[in-house]
Image: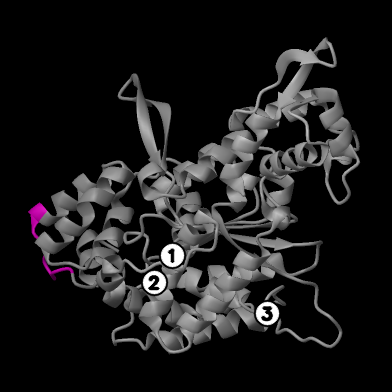
Amino acid sequence: MDASNEWNDLPNVPDRPTADAQAEVKRLAALPPAKYEIERKAVAQRLGWRVSALDAEVRKNRPRDTGDDANGDTETVIETVEPWPYPVHGASMADEIRDRLKAHVVFGASGDADCGALWIIGSYHMDTWRLWPRLLVTSPTKACGKSTLLETIDAMAHRGFIVSNASPAAIFRAIEAWRPTLLLDEADTWMKQNEELAGVLNSGHTRRTARVIRVAEVNGEHLPVAFSTWCPMVIAGIGSQRDTLMSRSVIISLRRKLPSESVTRLPINLHDQLLRLRRQIARWAADNSVRLGAMEIEPPACGNDRMQDNFTPLWRIATALGGPWPDRLAAAYTAQANAADEDTEPAAIIMLRDIAEIFASRRVDRIASIEIVSDLMVMEERPWADWRHGRPISAHSVAKLMKPFGVKVRNLKLHGASARVYLRSDVEAAAARYA
């Protein structure tokens, strides 16, 4: 196909585009993705094109450093959908998303599918949010449907892209280049112990902080370059993840199917089947972005500020949808808030409270570090006796966990001799902040 025919086939592009328009597209194609993102809407408006049409033409004109086949495969997966041509009834659309999620897996709680549906809709509104939570999918064991759920979400989310392993650099470069919804599977096998990756994932919780800086060669010079980490992200794995990731997530759980329960197998062409639904979500998002951006409502306080923050954008989406959705999300939010007990709290806070209880039971103003360790290890339903690979917690580990709270080991007199001790006043002052 020659250049003129390519331009004629592109929707909303004039039959005979001017040389200036072609030159503008080539200029945009040479820009770094972050700079193009800043300019794309204004240029599309100036040319009289849809933004999606401009995106498509710019992609065709970008240099392909990794080879045509690899780049072509990426562009097949990372799509830009054309919004549905007619207004969409939001509550009915959300019901369809919810029903599709529930058709293929068994959720651990009744409100999990509601949270998942609202999260999918929110993935189309990333220009609206100040903060956007991760969607953390957990299961107690294998064969609970995590990969099935990810494929289902991928078929409805904005620019979905599933991966089962990736380096931290690949993650932030993919976000910068493609602006996807990333769906990360098998997180328990490759993500939990990766410190650099944890930093990348944590940075993307709020738009203001969603960037990492790396040194890159630019025109022969090594310069600092900022990469965006701002994108919707689903993370699926067995068991819990890092405390920092869990606190930045809306958490939904899966269970293995009972003989009495039934689910529907995924159709081979699920992604193609749900193109209509993706277009409808995109249309609803376009029609309601200004309204959502102007909302200031928040869910009620639940004693956990981070959870309240994570649910705020979902709360606003549910309010905009109307119908049964505000009540559904309120029930899911209440259930998750009630379930956010000690098992979901950081280990350091649990230990701080346990040490405060030790002081309260002994009624003394100081206790030796070694005695604190001994008392912790005999506490029932606590992890201290089996802290690391079957070994009990040490005095060094206790000191390390308590240090951020300002609770430090002090060399003071105890029973007439010098000892390393903790003071009741330090512990109670810190514990009061996390009651």
Locate residue 226: give its quadrant: top left
Image location of residue 21, percent across then percent down: 12, 56
The Cα atoms of the two marked residues, 2 and 3, are separated by 27 Å
The Cα atoms of the two marked residues, 1 and 3, are separated by 27 Å
* First in residue order: circle 2 vs circle 3: 3
Mark 1 and mark 2 in contact? Answer it, CB < 8 Å: yes
Image location of residue 59, percent across then percent down: 33, 54
Which circle marks residue 312 in the picture?
A: 1
- Secondary structure beneath dot 3 equals helix
Of 54 and 315, nearer the camera is 315
Of 230 and 388, nearer the camera is 388
Which circle marks residue 104 in the picture?
A: 3
Q: What kind of residue is marked 3? A: His
Of 164 and 314, nearer the camera is 314
Callout 3: few (<14), some (14-19), or many (20+) C-alpha neighbours within 10 Å? Answer: some
Would residue 12 be found to the left or right of residue 175 on screen?
left
Q: What kind of residue is marked 1? A: Thr
Q: What kind of residue is marked 2? A: Arg
Marks 2, 3: nearer the viewer: 2
* SS assignment for the magenta stretch, majority: loop
Q: Which residues are magenta?
A: 13-20
- Secondary structure beneath dot 2 equals helix
Residue located at (30% from left, 24% from top):
219
Q: Quadrant of the N terminus?
A: bottom left
The Cα atoms of the two marked residues, 1 and 2, are separated by 6 Å
* First in residue order: circle 1 vs circle 3: 3
Which circle marks residue 316 in the picture?
A: 2
Callout 2: few (<14), some (14-19), or many (20+) C-alpha neighbours within 10 Å? Answer: many
Residue located at (56% from left, 43% from top):
433
